[in-house]
Amino acid sequence: YDFGTEKLAVINLMGHYGMPYVDNVFRCAETTVKILHNQGIKNIFIDFHAEATSEKRGLLMMLQGKVSAIIGTHTHVGTDDLQINQGTAYLTDIGLTGCRDNVIGIDEKVPLEKFRFGVAGRFEVPEKCKKILQMVIVTIENGEALESYKIKIFDDGRIIGRLGEFIVKNHLGGEKTKENESYDVNHLGEKLEIRCITDKLSFASSKEIGYG
């Protein structure tokens, strides 16, 4: 991807444990990163779709300092280990975006039948459910992650995690504010008050407050 004078490479990898058969993911990743470096591409983001946390940690140990970010996906359950090691942002699993009040985003009936009686079935996404949007923001410069933070947005109006000026301006339709100035935006069908506190923002709904 081209961003002005900068280039960003995105690599999608699949793990081994519990997954369909693929080429050796570690050798593939190592070779691909070397090719990108030889092409002069420093900004490299890896989406690692894997079941085993050990495989994801192993990839970090192998590529820390060589790529900008390694973010895990697949398990649907977010982990609490966001970190930056040697300029590489890492998170074992970002967690699902979708239904949050069932079994990893799908109707619980079929999974419970399988757990109790060993009877398999077709997974279905509920038509109605409580929803969540999860994301990770990574600031990259010259191939290194300078900062990284996670945001969780619930359909009941709660927003948890640091929300910088970029998120407000580009995703919530807000404008830059002065210190202690407040304003409202419509988001997820509910009025949310936003107060600027120095360089951070706190989002408050009538039900719960999430602080940055």
Image (spheres, rainbow, N blue to C red):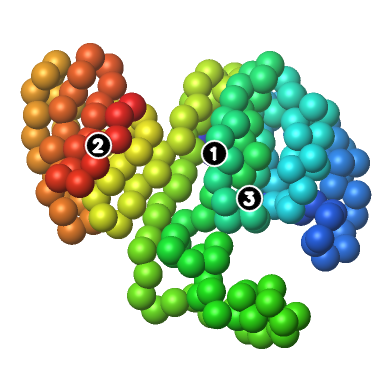
**Is residue 10 visible from the viewing direction of this image?**
no
Q: Is residue 60 at least partly visible in the picture?
A: yes
The mark nearer the N terminus, 2 or 1, is 1
Q: Position of residue 184 (x, y in %)?
A: 10, 40
Measured as percent of width and height from the top left, residue 60 is found at 75, 31
Q: Secondary structure at mark 1?
A: strand
Q: Which mark is residue 73?
A: 3
Lateral position of residue 15 relative to residue 80, left or right: right
Q: Amino acid at mark 1?
A: Asp
Q: Residues within 10 Å of mark 1 (few under 14, many from 20)?
A: few
| Figure quadrant of residue 85 | top right
> SS at mark 2?
strand
Determine crowd level at label 3: few under 14, some 14-19, many 20+ residues with C-alpha closer than 10 A: many
Per the image, the residue denoted by label 2 is: 209
Q: Amino acid at mark 2?
A: Ile
Tag shown at residue 11: none
- Left or right: where does residue 192 sit relative to residue 77? left
Mark 2 vs mark 3, foreground winner is 2
Determine contact: label 2, label 1, CB under 8 Å.
no
Q: Is residue 83 left or right of residue 39?
A: left
Q: Position of residue 212 (x, y in %)?
A: 33, 27
Residue under pointer 1: 2
3D distance between C-alphas at marks 1 and 3:
24 Å
Up-down relation of residue 99 to residue 148 (above or below)? below
Q: Quadrant of residue 199?
A: top left
Earlier residue among tags 1 and 3 = 1
Compute the Cα span from label 2 to label 1.
37 Å
* Residue drawn at 68 percent across, 16 percent down: 86
Cα–Cα gap, marks 2 and 3 = 27 Å
